[in-house]
């Protein structure tokens, strides 16, 4: 039987082996511990926004503020966005919108698979269906008075839209397997490509409403369309969803609730204070607009001057400063800021009015012929925007880029003038008096009025300011032309303006689904207004975007309220 003792030769061999290992170990220095690579600090930028942040839903009547809209562009995305030139730009990283029929107008929305809200919940076709219900007001049966107040029936979702342009559709249909939603319009609709429909996340609305998402969807699929002429008993589920959508995403700065901050865009909310919002990259974002910057701080300023001061002090890296003076641009550049200038979609035009009776066409034409529009532009905005040119449309501006250039190619716009001899000949010795109303606190309008009076005087026209109690013959009218061509044309063609030709062209534009045809009909609207001697477009506002040398890739935006839309192109400069 063995005792467990090893033979002496084996023991000797083992001892020798250990000795060799020990000897070799003594000849080799121990490797130093590996130092971990230092984590680089997060890349960040501070964006300036004028106004107070009040809601994570900028589509409500009270939430549609400049500050809320500016924040929303960082948090949310859909099938398209309005680019820096105010044109629709498709977002192929999210899905596609396709018009598959003109008669009837039928639009298909295709959603990419795997897109998520920032809480990890999938973006679904049901979210789109809910967005369709909100944006169309399909279930509303409210009737309104002239002031826009509801006098009967129910309006479920308190949207910022003053009237629905797209509610006349059949009930939207979704195919969850194919991930598509189909919307069929009762009539052709020019702005079909601006209806993106994704809204607040359905599951968050349901939670805030105290109902299930399934209950909301059941109503959307089954409830009848609202009829203002036969208002029905309000639907309790839609009422709850409507209240949650309309007010549940509002923010109390003293006690901010971030439950409404669920987003699907490149950034998500980390924290909120009364004067700033901290954003970080959305970790579940899989779209095409992945940002280079890890973080954004959005700072809110009470007014434009305080924002400007912060930019000059180096506290803000990117800001849309709006219309600033040439001297201010010089101070920004001296402080080290990069300055980008361009046109803004706000215009000033001389518009003749008919408060008592129409001023005779001869005086109208003579006054317009007396104006040197090129000089008016150079003296009023040329110092800020060297590329500024006389405005040539009542319904668009150079802020709209190629769409504006196509429009003015053949819209009946007169030359830049002046032709004082022809104006004098038309008047044939008459020296008419023209009273023009303008806003004296607007420095550009005040300058234009003084120059118009001087230029018209050379043709024998006595131009005077119209007081509050005076009957005005004309006005210097400031207009927002940031919407679609159809929207701005609809605003310009007021009762009688441009005559039947303008009204006819507007109706045709409303029903056109071809963007090129919309431009052609827009030319007809402008031409009718020019032929009717409606007035004279003069200048468009100029804007400034400033950014620090710490951030590159910033572009100028024509938007009057937001930082540049393509923020994902911003790069940190080391």
Image (spheres, grey):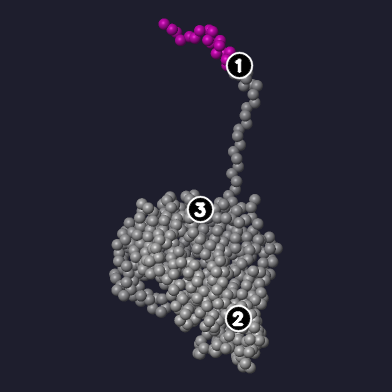
Q: Earlier in the sequence, mark 1 or mark 3?
A: 1
Q: Which mark is residue 440?
A: 2
The spot of residue 314 in percent (x, y) is 65, 60
Judged from the image, the secondary structure of the residue bearing numbered disc 1 is helix
Per the rendering, the mark at residue 288 is 3
Q: Is residue 171 above or below residue 1?
A: below
x 55%, y 13%: residue:
14
Give the secondary structure at mark 2.
loop
Q: Nearer the viewer, residue 533 or 212?
A: 533
Task: Inspect the magenta stretch and tell me whether residue 11 lies in it.
Answer: yes
Mark 1 nearby-residue class (10 Å; few <14, some 14–19, many ≥20): few
Q: CA distance from mark 1 to mark 3?
A: 62 Å
Report the residue that reaches farthest toward the bottom.
429
Residue 3 on the magenta segment:
yes
Which residue was labeled with disc 1? 20
Q: Nearer the viewer, mark 1 or mark 3?
A: 3
Q: Position of residue 264 (x, y in %)?
A: 46, 55
**Principal secondary structure, stretch drawn in magenta:** helix
Label 3: few (<14), some or many (≥20) within 10 Å? few
* Residue 387 at x, y percent in the picture: 64, 69
Residue 114 seen in this snapshot: yes
Mark 2 or mark 3, earlier in chain: 3
């Amino acid at each position: 039987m063995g005792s467990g003792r090893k033979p002496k030769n084996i023991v000797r061999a083992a001892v020798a082996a250990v000795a060799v290992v020990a000897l070799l170990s003594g000849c080799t220095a121990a490797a130093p511990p590996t130092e971990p690579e230092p984590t680089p600090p997060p890349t960040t930028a501070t964006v300036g926004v004028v106004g107070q942040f009040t809601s994570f839903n900028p589509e409500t009547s009270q939430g549609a503020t400049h500050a809320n809209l500016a924040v929303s562009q960082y948090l949310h995305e859909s099938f398209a966005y309005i680019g820096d030139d105010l044109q629709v730009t498709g977002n192929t990283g999210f899905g596609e919108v396709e018009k598959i029929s003109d008669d009837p107008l039928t639009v298909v929305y295709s959603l990419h698979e795997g897109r998520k809200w920032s809480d990890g919940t999938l973006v679904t076709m049901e979210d789109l269906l809910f967005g369709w219900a909100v944006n169309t007001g399909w279930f509303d049966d409210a009737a309104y008075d002239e002031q826009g107040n509801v006098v009967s029936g129910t309006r479920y979702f308190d949207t910022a839209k003053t009237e629905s342009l797209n509610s006349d559709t059949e009930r939207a249909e979704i195919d969850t397997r194919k991930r598509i939603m189909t919307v069929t319009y009762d009539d052709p609709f020019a702005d079909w490509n601006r209806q993106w429909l994704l809204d607040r996340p359905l599951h968050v609305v349901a939670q805030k409403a105290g109902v299930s998402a399934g209950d909301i969807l059941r109503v959307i699929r089954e409830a009848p369309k609202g009829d203002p002429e036969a208002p029905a008993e309000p639907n309790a589920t839609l009422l709850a969803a409507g209240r949650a959508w309309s007010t549940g995403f509002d923010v109390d700065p003293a006690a901010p609730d971030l439950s409404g901050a669920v987003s699907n865009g490149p950034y998500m909310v980390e924290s909120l204070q009364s004067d700033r919002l901290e954003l970080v990259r959305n970790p579940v974002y899989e779209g095409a607009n992945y940002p280079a910057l890890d973080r954004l701080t959005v700072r809110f300023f009470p007014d434009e001057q305080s924002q400007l001061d912060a930019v000059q002090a180096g506290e803000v890296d990117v800001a849309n400063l709006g219309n600033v003076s040439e001297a201010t641009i010089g101070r920004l550049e001296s402080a080290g800021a990069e300055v980008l200038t361009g046109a803004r979609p706000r215009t000033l035009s001389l518009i003749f009015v008919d408060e008592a009776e129409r001023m005779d066409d001869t005086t109208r034409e003579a006054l317009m012929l007396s104006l040197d529009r090129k000089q008016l532009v150079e003296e009023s905005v040329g110092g800020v925007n060297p590329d500024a040119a006389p405005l040539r449309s009542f319904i668009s501006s150079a802020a709209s880029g190629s769409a504006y250039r196509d429009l003015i190619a053949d819209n009946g716009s007169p030359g830049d003038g002046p032709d004082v001899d022809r104006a004098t000949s038309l008047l044939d010795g008459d020296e008419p008096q023209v009273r023009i109303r303008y806003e004296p606190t607007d420095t550009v309008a005040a300058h234009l009025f003084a120059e118009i009076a001087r230029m018209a005087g050379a043709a024998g026209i006595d131009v005077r300011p119209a007081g509050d109690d005076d009957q005005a013959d004309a006005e210097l009218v400031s207009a927002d032309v940031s919407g679609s061509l159809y929207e701005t044309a609809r605003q310009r063609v007021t009762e009688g303006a441009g005559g039947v030709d303008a009204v006819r062209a507007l109706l045709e534009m409303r029903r056109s689904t071809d963007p090129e045809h919309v431009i052609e009909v827009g030319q007809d609207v402008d031409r009718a207004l020019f032929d009717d001697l409606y007035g004279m477009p003069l200048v468009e506002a100029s804007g400034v975007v400033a950014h620090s040398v710490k951030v590159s890739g910033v572009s100028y935006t024509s938007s009057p309220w937001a930082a540049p839309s393509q923020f994902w192109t911003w790069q940190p400069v080391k």
